[in-house]
Image (tube, helix red, strand yellow):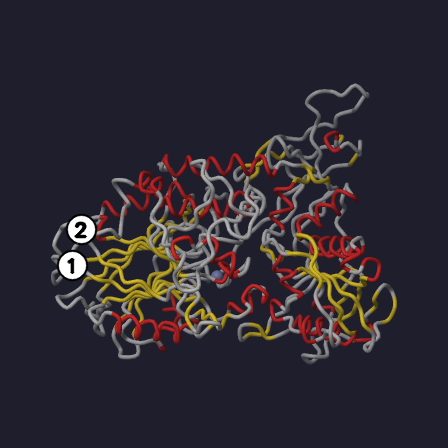
């Protein structure tokens, strides 16, 4: 049942990246001092194409002041799968023992929360690219569970027949619709060639890990390395509960220690051990991509380093999107390497482990026995074979994404603070999605039709804005296409309904301030059909005045039953909104509806041109806690000046100073790069068929900056 590497993948990497296959008939000659290379990447999130703005740049030098984290820092453009291939080859070219003693490993979140060109094809493009890059092994990340465990097993081709993985690559999907897309070689999806490892994810039915816990790899000289994969034990709090039913997530340390025990029981000669862990830490101010400011103190990965067995020699971490290169003392006081390669393929970690005659890595209080260098993935010489795969999917995505959905009069944005999207404020885009789900559920008899009272939307489910600005020739200013709407909700959730009691609804609102991941945080839900007042200064559990909650304009009755719509993630209690489950009256069951993007598209088409809904549904009683503005301008859209005068005597506006404006995150992953900004103008929205005349101001793209310390 186990699949072998694709012939294509072998051909693409021939000469540089065929790894993990010892040269046939060469006797093992492992020796004291042999160096083994691991090249590591994490949190790629399907960034197969180069990204623009902050997502595609990396601070690589201090500037004149010799200090990182200051305004004269020097950035370079980085990333893109074809550039990763080039950087990987360069890293290996600098490794004297050669590629046969080198392994390319991942630490999770390689797929999902990805741009349109990967996501709309269920991230099969990213898997094809990773296969062609010759990725050998990866831990799973929390995002590998976004579409549920069956989907993870579907894409995990290399483990078919192993562990719990009896699902094949085209099983349970409709080819070319929701999976099993024809790849760049003209054949249907065949799954990942690399095993995903998940030592701490236990299938309750078998008591075993859902995917292999570890792999023992042997280099060309006969040196053995044990590779273990684990994922953050916070995963059940941040993925849809439906998708992980029947799974138990052990702590990371439990998973690692058990895997070491099992691995050494299987083969006691495995002494060099590396862990790929989808959990991480952060640097303090002044840190840079190859630094270790603050020594990760107080972060999850520091606690895990202190807790796990001293048998582990190297920790390759992830999840926080912060690159670092650290050595931390283990519980015996010996140094241990702890790395992370940032995110989106901006950096690769080049890790060198030196083994002694017994195959062990000699770690002491002063030496980790292994070293690492984080290497920026600079652009400039993209690998043509990988580029051709990426180009194939970009072409398909452009076609799929260009389908028009509707039009807009202004930017439809998430909430912003300081230029970055935040999740603790009401947003126009969130309200629009909630409106769409309420309208869709009311239009759908099986979901309750006219009886549906309220819709809720989680802020973390909004992954991009819908900007006025053109994303390319097929998307004039003010146009909304499928690529844009898909980027907003890329997780393929469904819109569902369930009954909640009035008390349950009140609890849901209070749980906006729940303790998540050990820290109190405010995740403000978007609501439709509901208004309320809240006092953020009040005690937890009584921040929402029940008397202020109006449903359809009527006061909430705590004992009454209401019909509530939300996406499948939230309605199952995702993001610690447990009251979506505990607040149901006895016997209430969830009814499943259509895909969330489809529901949104239908709504947008019906009400176009879309204007941003007002931010007046949740009213804070604390004047110090007023809502932030979206931060990217309220519109209106800046419509294009018609290039060909229409026959109807249209009066084109006066274009301002043309120019280009770098857009940090164009939102749909299709047209990264500089987008045209025609400056202040008035004009006619001819492409939208409505003949709508708008007074224009400069539409600025939403800024997007990823802060330190996020967990994704
Ligand atoms: Zn993650």
Q: Is residue 67 visible?
A: no
Disc 1 from disc 2: Cα separation: 8 Å
For residue 39, side relative to residue 453 (left or right): left
Q: Mark 2: few, some, or many residues within 10 Å (few <14, many ≥20)?
A: some
For residue 701, side relative to residue 603 (left or right): left
Q: Which residue is mark 2?
A: 97
Which residue appears at 76% of the width and 57% of the height? 615
Which residue appears at 34% of the width and 71% of the height? 259
Dot 2 falls on a residue whose secondary structure is loop
For residue 548, side relative to residue 276 (left or right): right
Which residue occupies the foreground of this view, 62 or 571? 571
User: First in sequence: mark 1 or mark 2?
Assistant: 1
In the depicted structure, whether residue 596 falls above or below residue 82: below
Q: Mark 1: few, some, or many residues within 10 Å (few <14, many ≥20)?
A: some
Q: Tell me the tag on residue 538.
A: none
Instruction: Count how many numbered circles sit on residues in the image.
Output: 2
Residue 503 position, x and y percent, is: 77, 76
Which residue occupies the foreground of this view, 544 or 309? 309
Q: Quadrant of residue 196?
A: bottom left
Quadrant of the snapshot with the N terminus:
bottom left
Residue 546 position, x and y percent, is: 80, 75
Residue 80 position, x and y percent, is: 43, 43
Dot 1 falls on a residue whose secondary structure is loop
Which residue occupies the foreground of this view, 27 or 508? 27
For residue 336, side relative to residue 324 (left or right): left
Q: Which residue is mark 1?
A: 34
In the depicted structure, whether residue 401 falls above or below residue 649: below
Q: Is residue 155 visible?
A: yes
Residue that lies at the very extreme toward the right in this rendered image: 554
Whether tag 1 and tag 2 are in contact, CB under 8 A, the answer is: yes
Q: Quadrant of residue 156?
A: bottom left
Which residue occupies the foreground of this view, 278 or 596? 596
């Amino acid at each position: 049942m186990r699949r072998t590497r694709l012939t294509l993948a072998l051909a693409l990497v021939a000469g540089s990246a065929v790894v993990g296959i010892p040269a046939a008939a060469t006797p093992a000659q492992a020796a004291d001092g042999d160096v083994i290379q691991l090249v590591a990447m994490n949190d790629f999130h399907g960034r197969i194409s180069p990204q623009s703005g902050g997502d595609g740049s990396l601070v690589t030098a201090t500037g004149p002041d010799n200090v990182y984290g200051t305004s004269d820092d020097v950035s370079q453009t980085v990333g893109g799968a074809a550039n990763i291939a080039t950087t990987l080859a360069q890293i290996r070219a600098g490794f004297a023992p050669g590629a046969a003693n080198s392994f390319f490993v991942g630490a999770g979140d390689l797929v999902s929360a990805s741009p349109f060109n990967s996501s709309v094809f269920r991230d099969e493009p990213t898997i094809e690219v990773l296969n062609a890059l010759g990725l050998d092994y990866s831990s799973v990340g929390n995002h590998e569970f976004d579409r549920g465990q069956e989907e993870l097993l579907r894409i995990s081709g290399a483990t078919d027949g192993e562990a719990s993985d009896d699902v094949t690559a085209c099983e349970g999907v409709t080819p070319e619709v929701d999976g099993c897309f024809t790849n760049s070689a003209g054949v249907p999806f065949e799954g990942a060639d690399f095993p995903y490892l998940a030592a701490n994810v236990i299938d309750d039915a078998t008591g075993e890990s859902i995917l292999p816990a570890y792999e023992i790899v042997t280099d060309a000289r006969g040196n053995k390395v044990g590779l273990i994969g684990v994922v953050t034990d916070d995963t059940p709090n941040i993925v849809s509960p439906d998708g992980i039913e029947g799974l138990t997530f052990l702590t990371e340390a439990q998973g690692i220690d058990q895997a070491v025990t099992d691995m050494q029981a299987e083969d006691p000669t495995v002494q060099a051990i590396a862990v790929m862990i989808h959990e991480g830490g952060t640097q303090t101010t002044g840190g840079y991509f190859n630094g270790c400011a603050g020594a990760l103190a107080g972060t999850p990965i520091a606690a895990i380093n202190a807790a796990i067995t001293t048998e582990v020699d190297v920790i390759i971490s992830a999840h926080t999107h912060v690159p670092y290169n650290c050595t931390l003392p283990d519980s015996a006081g010996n140094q241990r390497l702890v790395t992370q390669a940032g995110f989106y393929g901006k950096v690769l970690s080049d890790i060198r482990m030196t083994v002694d005659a017994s195959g062990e890595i000699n770690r002491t209080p002063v030496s980790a026995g292994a070293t690492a260098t984080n290497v920026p993935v600079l652009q400039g010489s993209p690998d043509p074979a990988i580029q051709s795969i990426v180009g194939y999917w970009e072409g398909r995505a452009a076609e799929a994404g260009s389908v028009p959905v509707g039009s807009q009069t202004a930017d439809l944005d998430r909430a912003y603070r300081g230029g970055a999207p935040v999740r603790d404020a009401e947003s126009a885009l969130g309200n629009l999605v909630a409106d769409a789900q309420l309208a869709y559920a009311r239009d759908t008899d099986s979901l309750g039709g006219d009886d549906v009272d309220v819709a809720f939307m989680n802020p973390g489910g909004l992954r991009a804005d819908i900007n006025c600005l053109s994303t390319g020739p097929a998307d004039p200013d003010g146009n909304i296409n499928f690529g844009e709407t898909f980027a907003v909700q890329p997780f393929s959730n469904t819109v569902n309904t369930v009954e909640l009691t009035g008390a349950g609804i009140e609890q849901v609102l209070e749980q906006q301030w729940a303790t998540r991941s050990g820290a109190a945080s405010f995740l403000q839900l978007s609501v439709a059909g509901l208004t309320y007042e809240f006092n953020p200064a009040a005690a937890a559990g009584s921040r929402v005045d029940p008397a202020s909650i109006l449903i359809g304009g009527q006061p909430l009755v705590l004992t009454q039953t209401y019909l509530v719509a939300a996406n499948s993630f939230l309605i199952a209690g995702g993001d610690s909104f447990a009251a979506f489950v505990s607040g149901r009256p006895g016997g209430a069951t969830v009814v499943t509806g259509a895909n969330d993007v489809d529901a949104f598209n239908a709504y947008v088409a019906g009400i176009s041109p879309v204007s941003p809904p007002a931010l007046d549904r949740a009213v804070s009683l604390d004047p110090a806690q007023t809502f932030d503005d979206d931060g990217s301008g309220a519109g209106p859209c800046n419509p294009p000046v018609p290039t060909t005068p229409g026959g109807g005597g249209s009066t084109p506006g006066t274009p301002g100073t043309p120019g280009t404006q770098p857009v940090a995150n164009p939102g749909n992953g299709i047209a990264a790069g500089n987008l045209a900004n025609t400056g202040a103008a008035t004009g006619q929205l001819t492409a939208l068929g409505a003949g709508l005349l708008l007074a224009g101001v400069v539409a600025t793209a939403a800024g997007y900056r990823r802060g330190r310390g996020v967990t994704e």
